Amino acid sequence: MRTIDSRIDLDIAAARGPAPSRTSRLFLFAVRAMRTWRNRAAVNRLHDFDDWQLRDIGLERSDVKDALTSTFFADPGLHLTIASRERAQRYLRNGRRD
């Protein structure tokens, strides 16, 4: 066995790691819930922006409304990120505003 082969085996074994404990899963759930709550508060503040400011960051008013009507546990920041990236990709493909 060469040194490279043994190194690969060690990386695979180290990547598995132990299963997360209940405490760590609870902690991760709390972290995600706080992040979602903060993002929801930030999206609520986007209502104060006018249409030009929203367009400047790649969003539309309908994107903000859609993000806020998502379920409570869904992260609205992720929804806005996806909407903004899709709009940017359409703009780059078409070479025009939509």
Image: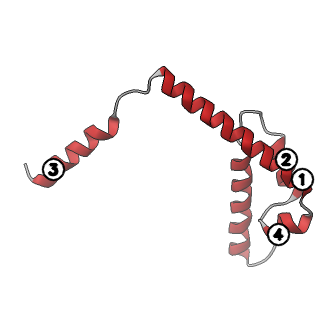
Query: How many residues crowd around disc 2 within 10 Å: few (fewer than 14), some, or many (20 or more)?
Result: some
The answer for how far apart the CA atoms under marks 1 and 4 are is 21 Å
Query: Which mark is nearer the camera, 2 or 3?
Result: 2
Query: How many residues crowd around disc 4 within 10 Å: few (fewer than 14), some, or many (20 or more)?
Result: few
SS at badge 1: helix
The answer for how far apart the CA atoms under marks 1 and 2 are is 6 Å
Of the residues shown, which amino acid type is indicated by label 3? Asp
Label whose residue precedes the other's in the sequence (2 or 4): 2
Q: Pointers 2 and 4 in contact (CB under 8 A)?
A: no
Which residue position holds label 1? 47
Which residue position holds label 4? 98
SS at badge 2: helix
Residue 49 or residue 63, whichever sits in front? 49
Which residue position holds label 3? 5
Q: Pointers 1 and 2 in contact (CB under 8 A)?
A: yes
Query: Which mark is nearer the camera, 1 or 4?
Result: 1
The answer for how far apart the CA atoms under marks 4 and 3 are is 52 Å
Which residue position holds label 2? 44
At 61% across and 35% down in the image, what residue appears? Answer: 31
